[in-house]
């Protein structure tokens, strides 16, 4: 009796898995159109949330398809830069858009990704409550501002919300703390949200706390009327420049001819027509990188070295 | 955000299929367990019960590790497709479906076998009566599996990716809208999710009881 039932269990589990795989096979053959048209290839793209939220990436990819007439479907995964890069190095995603130079450098050095373009930049800003208890608006630099926030925090006057998710913004924040020679982790006024930029901004807004943000996400929330207490207190073009780059994974699963052709075409698009789209439609949010490439590239190099 | 209807329909077929797969597996599992030696059955059932509470993110990571380009099932190319979610969600739903069903099968078999012994029924007749007894629980078992599958986020986000127009389901839509600060849309998707699970639960439960009464 027991022997029979064990066989049944095994059989049914096998059948269940087989059904799933058969389904997968059917699906992949069903998605191939029967006509003479070439089947649309599906390429997975991992991106940092700011490009997703501001719709810049959607626009760029749609315009790319229009311009080239390629039948390609992009599967867009909106993740923090840390996770996006991990997916690239796994080969789970073949193309990636990120903004964390020091993390990118790590993956570049171990050969798991290749940079094809630096296509846009904007800046991070330090935002905080209007009354600015830490005096950030009088700070000489971003590092000075972080020192002021630390002091005010220790006095119980200010709070700071950190992303804590290994995203591009979080990495930059940690670099600034390091430059300031301070370690806020574990302090009562230093709150780690572990969430995306928008949630972190809303949290800071509710708590009247300081935080570091990219201007894209901030603008999109402000234009939706969701920010009531936060204002931009400090800009620092030198330390707070935010560089967006385009990568292709060099993992085995992305080495097909289709993918590398597509990656090269997309890079070419980003450096030409894409630049115009960024300049015309996203004037307040992003700057096309090509016109200032030497400046932006040297900023990237400097940032990538700040571990 | 893409249309709410598309997301809802996608959610329904993915979770419906996943819970169907796990329901069939649970059915076979619970009948085999009920006929197995009691000591063995108890150990397996206890193990299943302990799996009921495993976080779906863990199962999501497991599914990712199975399907990603360096995983054992990489050649199937299923990562970030609806089928990845079906596989992961059927693993999510299996323990709870099986536990519910196993309890009911065990109970009805023990009740019925006494009756059958006193009436001198064959084992075929015994199974017939037992099967009729558990009809309402069949629906319950499918439903708890379905609710767990449609309400889970870990698998859908990690193995499915929440890709717009492809693998974006109700829970990933909520997570995505929340992550970009769009709480209003997130809550409306949440309300859809709640009403769907409530409606389907009610409908299938009444259906199960009708069938049970009429048989």
Image (cartoon, coloured by chain):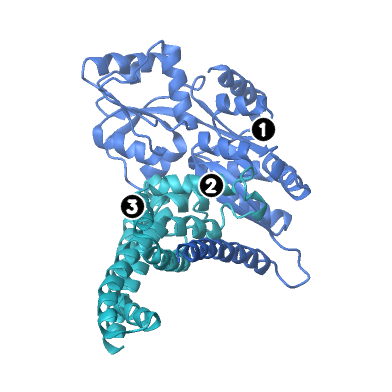
Chain colours: A blue, B cyan
Instruction: Kindly report the distance in space between the C-alpha atoms of the residues bearing marks 3 and 1.
Output: 44 Å
Report how far apart the C-alphas of labels 1 and 2 lie in the structure: 19 Å
Q: Are marks 1 and 2 in contact (CB under 8 Å)?
A: no
Which residue is at 69% across, 29% downward?
A: A111
Q: Do circles 2 and 3 both sit on a common chain?
A: yes
In the rendered view, tell whether residue A299 sits above or below residue A31.
above
Q: Kindly report which numbered mark, 3 or 1, lies closer to the viewer in this rendering.
A: 3
In this view, the residue farthest toward the left is A156
Query: Could you tell me which chain the residue with mark 3 belongs to?
Result: B
> Residue A260 placed where, x, y %?
75, 44
Q: Pick the residue in front: A216 or A36.
A: A36
Residue hosting label 2? B64
- Dot 1 and dot 2 within a common chain: no
Give the answer, above or below, for where A152 lies relative to A269: above
Q: Which residue is mark 3?
A: B46
- Binning the other alpha carbons within 10 Å of mark 1 as few (below 14), some (14 to 19) or many (20 upward) gives some
Query: Which residue carries the number 1 mark?
Result: A112
Secondary structure, mark 3, is helix
User: Badge 3: few (under 14), some or many (20 or more) residues near its Cα, within 10 Å?
Assistant: few
SS for dot 1: loop
Relative depth, front residue between A142 and B79: B79
């Amino acid at each position: 009796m027991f022997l029979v039932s064990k066989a049944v269990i095994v059989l049914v589990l096998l059948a269940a898995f087989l059904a799933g795989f058969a389904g997968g096979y059917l699906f992949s053959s069903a998605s191939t159109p029967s006509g003479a048209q070439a089947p649309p290839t599906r390429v997975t793209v991992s991106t940092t949330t700011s490009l997703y939220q501001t719709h810049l990436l959607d626009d760029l990819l749609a315009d790319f398809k229009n311009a080239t007439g390629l039948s390609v479907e992009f599967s867009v995964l909106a993740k923090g830069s840390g996770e996006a890069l991990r997916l690239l190095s796994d080969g789970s995603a073949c193309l990636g858009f990120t903004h964390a130079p020091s993390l990118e450098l790590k993956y570049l050095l171990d050969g798991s990704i290749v940079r094809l373009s630096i296509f846009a930049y904007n800046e991070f800003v330090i935002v905080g409550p209007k009354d600015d208890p830490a005096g950030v608006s009088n700070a000489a630099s971003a590092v000075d501002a972080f020192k002021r926030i630390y002091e005010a925090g220790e006095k119980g006057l200010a709070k700071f919300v950190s992303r804590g998710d290994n995203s591009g913004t979080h990495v930059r924040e940690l670099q600034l703390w390091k430059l300031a020679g301070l370690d806020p982790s574990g302090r009562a006024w230093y709150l780690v949200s572990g969430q995306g930029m928008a949630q972190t901004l809303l949290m800071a807004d509710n708590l009247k706390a300081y935080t570091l943000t990219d201007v894209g996400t901030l603008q999109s929330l402000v234009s939706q009327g969701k920010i009531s207490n936060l204002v931009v207190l400090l800009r620092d073009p030198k330390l707070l420049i935010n560089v967006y780059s385009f990568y292709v994974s060099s993992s085995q699963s992305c080495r097909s001819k289709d993918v590398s052709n597509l990656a090269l075409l997309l890079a070419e698009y980003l450096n030409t027509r894409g630049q115009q789209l960024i300049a015309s439609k996203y004037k307040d949010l992003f700057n096309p990188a090509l016109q200032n490439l030497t400046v932006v590239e040297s900023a990237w190099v400097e940032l990538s070295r700040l571990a | 955000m893409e249309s709410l209807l598309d997301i809802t329909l996608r959610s329904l077929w993915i979770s419906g299929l996943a819970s169907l797969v796990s329901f069939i597996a649970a059915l076979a599992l619970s009948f085999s367990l009920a006929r197995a030696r009691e000591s063995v059955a108890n150990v397996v059932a206890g193990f299943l019960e302990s799996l009921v509470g495993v976080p779906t993110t863990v199962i999501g990571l497991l599914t990712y590790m199975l399907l990603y380009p360096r995983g054992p099932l990489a050649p199937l190319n299923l990562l970030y497709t609806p089928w990845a979610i079906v596989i992961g969600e059927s693993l999510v739903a299996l323990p709870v479906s099986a536990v519910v069903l196993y309890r009911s099968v065990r109970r009805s078999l023990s009740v019925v076998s006494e009756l059958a012994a006193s009436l001198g029924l064959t084992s075929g007749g015994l199974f017939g009566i037992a099967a009729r007894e558990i009809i309402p629980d069949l629906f319950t078992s499918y439903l708890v599996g379905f609710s767990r599958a449609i309400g889970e986020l870990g698998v859908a986000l990690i193995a499915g990716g929440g890709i717009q127009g492809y693998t974006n389901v109700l829970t990933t839509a909520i997570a995505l809208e929340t992550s970009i600060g769009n709480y209003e849309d997130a809550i409306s998707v949440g309300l859809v999710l709640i009403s769907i699970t409530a409606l389907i639960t009610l409908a299938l439960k009444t259906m199960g009881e009708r069938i049970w009464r009429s048989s």
